[in-house]
Image (cartoon, rainbow, N blue to C red):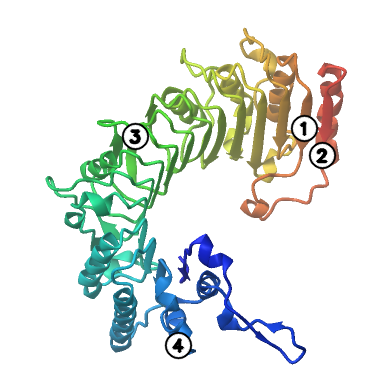
Amino acid sequence: MGNYLTSRITAEKHAHVKQTSKNRNGRPGLKFHDLPEDVLCTILSKLPAKEAVRTSVLSSDWRCTWTACPRLSFGGDDVSKNAKRKHQHTQMFIDRVNAVLTKHSGRAVDQLEIKFIFETKLADHLNNWIRFAMSAHTESLAFDLAPPNNFPDYGDHYRFPFEQFTDNKSVSCLACLQLSFVRFEPPPTGFIGFPNLRKLHLHVVKTTRQDLESVLCSCVNLEWLSLLRCHLKDEMKVVLRPLSHLRYLHVVHCDITKIEFDAPNLSTFVYDGPYRPITLHHATKLENVRFWFRGAVFQHATASLLNGLPDVQNLTLQLGSQRLESRWTLNSPRMFCHLRHAQILLIIHREDSDKILYLVSFLRVAPFIERLEVHFHGLYTLWFATDGPSRQEIPPCEDKYVNLKDVRVTGFKGARGQAEFLMHAVENAPAIEAVTVDTAQKLTDAWDPDEPTPSLDSAALDMVRGPLLKRLPPNAKLSLI
């Protein structure tokens, strides 16, 4: 969050510029203070709040210009570890914020942002600043109170004052709420919720499953939800009341045991964390899903997505420290009937080099896929690995991949499993139009500092050049990189 003040002035004011003086050549000479008020405020918006306030001493015309800015942002520098200087720094920040808000008393403030490391002394002032925001009909409220690290050293989180949100008129203006290092404890009665909240971002928020569900269920018009490092140590569920307007869901590095949402209009879902069961009810409009599962078996992760997100259209699945399993099918009657584009990023361990071909189990449950990308990242021992079965040893594919037109494989090292997987995909894709085989790794090579120079690239590509050309349709394009 930056420090800025921005004004919104009517078009009529913008159209009229003050009478300007003339320079020595008789031409109009535009002076800085001759600019329209909204332009002056735009210039002030590039300054930190305290610097913008200081411009009031430049001239009588500028004395109150900064108070017309309805976007307020306050940020403190890093707090000194010295107790006395830390206390002084905090008090200076409090005084500065209070002085500016006093000047804005009675004015509408569209946006209020506070960024400062939380300490107990701030609690009452934060409550007052929230009270000011509600009286000023603020649309966007952001409190970033998280310390840079070592959270336990900074004590407990700031308790968010839900009891202040009881006035329908003021609460109805709030459309965006961003909170960091706060504690959620909504009261059992009296809290009317956030009826017009569109965007909610929570970072290091301390809460329980019941309290979080209570808050989210009160956000009936929520469209955008992000949770970062919110450790529930429990399920995250919102099923009592559907989030009918939710379109974007972002859950990253949260300690949870399960995700279950009823979000019929959800279009984008991003998840990064340990492998957990995920269920989205009625999410028939789900377009884009990006998951980074950590510590998962590939087939188990895919089965979970198949059961919980069967309507996804575009899927990016990255697995860190994952394992592959020797299974030909997922033993599930369900299919990804709407999946058109899949991007799979795999870190292949030495002990799993003989299971690469088993990735065909994913294709078996994605019969209408049009574009497939598989990005391998493996140790140097993956070069020309000969472990694993041939494609003739697996059960035949009953249904062809009739819509598959584009296949791309990166991190190709001539391993038998990689070559067999490629051949299986091409042989069962009668409408294939393009195949790309790239020896470079999409994932950073920093994972393998001992990776040899790519002197074996040509030999790896020669392994599949002839077989692919023999199986591809005449008009299909083959790119070997």
For disc 3, the marked residue is 243
- Quadrant assignment for the N terminus: bottom left
The tag earlier along the polypeptide, 3 or 1, is 3
Residue 22 picture quarter: bottom right
- Residue 120 at what x, y percent from top left? 22, 72
Task: Give the number of the disc on residue 436.
Answer: 1
Q: What residue sits 12% from the left and 45% below the top?
A: 188
Q: Is residue 80 above or below residue 45?
A: below
Kind of element beneath mark 4: helix
For disc 2, the marked residue is 481
Question: In the rendered structure, which amino acid carries the disc numbered 2?
Answer: Ile
The tag earlier along the polypeptide, 4 or 2, is 4
**Front position in the image: 129 or 235:** 129
Instruction: Determine contact: label 3, label 2, CB under 8 Å.
Output: no
The tag earlier along the polypeptide, 1 or 2, is 1
**1 or 4: mark nearer the eye:** 4
